[in-house]
Image (cartoon, helix red, strand yellow):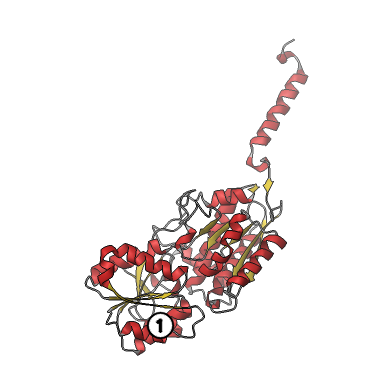
Amino acid sequence: MTADSHPSIHKRAASALVALALMASPAFADKHYGPGATDTEIKIGQTMPYSGPASIYNTIGKSEVAYIAKINADGGVNGRKIDLISLDDGYSPPRTVEQTRKLVEQEQVLMIFGSLGTATNTAIQKYLNARKVPHIMLATAALKWDDPANYPWSMALVPNQRADVPAYVRYLSKVKPDAKAAVLYQNDDFGRDYVKMLRTVLGERASNLVVAEASYEITDATVDSQVIALYNSGADVLFNFSTPKFAAMSIRKVYDLGWHPLHFVPSNATSVEAVLKPAGLERAVGLVSTNYVKDPADPEWKNDPATKDYLAFMRSYYPEADPLDTQNVVGYITAEALIQVLKQCGNDLTRENVMRQAANLKDLALPMLLPGIKINTSATDYTPIKHVQMRRFDGKTWVRIPD
């Protein structure tokens, strides 16, 4: 008897084909879950400085929470809602450790996402890598986050000093090749990495070009004495590698001294609302920095669809914030990058696969990134954003400098 002549064999063969099709379909693929992941939820944790000396950054965390609320309202990711638990660490490393342990050991989160600060993230890096917990999309520019060989579970998102400093030096070489430079920096990995990269990029020129350096601690009340010492060095260029609070104080002091150097500040200290207005807009005229996101205050993006979408999001989900503060754009982009990673994870929501997908972003062009800037990562490349664009403050807004 042949199969063609036996209907029961036809039925069994058809059933087997259907079963194979269902097994091959992504919708029916086997599900693999790590801590914090279920059929309906993905639990994620982060720490943010909602209080303390870096509380000026807290709007980044709030904008991320707001974006996750939008995603959940739209149905979540792959049918799952996201529970983002965002805790205050006061920008204090011991508090960061305490809150992170709570998130990992009590809340059982799948990952730590977007936590802010170099010193704070450094305090939890070894702990999270030892426990193999993804520690990704961090808001810190230190070089240590691009070290997959030693810390395969930690990755930042924002551009680091390898992007910023070469851009500063190229610009300086064009407009003031015979400069005498002074350097102000925060005495932690963030600031020291800027100084290290500056000297690396300058090479043999560093010993003649850099005439003075001064550092400050995050707990210092002012940086007046440091700025005065740098002014007295006779420098006509100031590399100001400061975080927002100290950038505002130093910008004010430089102006009040009657000092008019070519003044560079890092991109994290360029917020008009959080840095330049406290310093005094007239004191900030001529500042030079880098950027990688669209500035919603820039008339260039007035009719840009992505900017319109961002502003609509802010009105609906975070109306109490200033939509023109680019820190909110940073939070928006960081949350978008997270969503891309989760989409790529599909139904394999293990910690291993989260890290695998975070290290597998290819030419990701998020709408609020500047044109030409894309996110790329690999198992050996933990620097997602590698390019920046130069800009100058004109007293009202930041203006891009053609490169």
Side of 145 relative to 77 (left or right)? left
**Residue 320, located in which quarter of the rendered image?**
bottom right
Badge 1: residue crowd in 10 Å (few <14, some 14–19, many ≥20):
many
Measured as percent of width and height from the top left, residue 384 is found at: 46, 56
Q: Amino acid at mark 1?
A: Ser
- Is the C terminus in the top left, top right, bottom left or bottom right quadrant? bottom left
Report the side of 276 relative to 323 (left or right): left
Q: Is residue 111 above or below residue 238?
A: above
Q: Is residue 350 above or below residue 118?
A: above
One can see residue 4 in this view: yes
Q: How many numbered tags mark residues here?
A: 1
* Residue 403 seen in this snapshot: no
Q: Is residue 317 above or below residue 216?
A: above
**x, y percent for residue 1:** 75, 10
Above or below for 248 versus 26: below
* Rendered residue at 51%/68% (across/down): 118
- The residue labelled by disc 1 is 250
* Frontmost residue, 341 versus 219: 219
Q: What residue occupies the far front of the structure in this picture? A: 207
**Residue closest to the far right:** 8
| Dot 1: element | helix
Q: Position of residue 287 (x, y in %)?
A: 35, 77
Residue lying furthest top: 1
In this view, the residue in front, 214 or 310, is 214
Please state which of residues 386 and 342 is positioned toward the viewer in this rendering. Answer: 386
| 402 lies left or right of 93 | left
Residue at 71% x, 15% y: name it.
4
| Image location (x, y in percent) of residue 303 | 43, 67
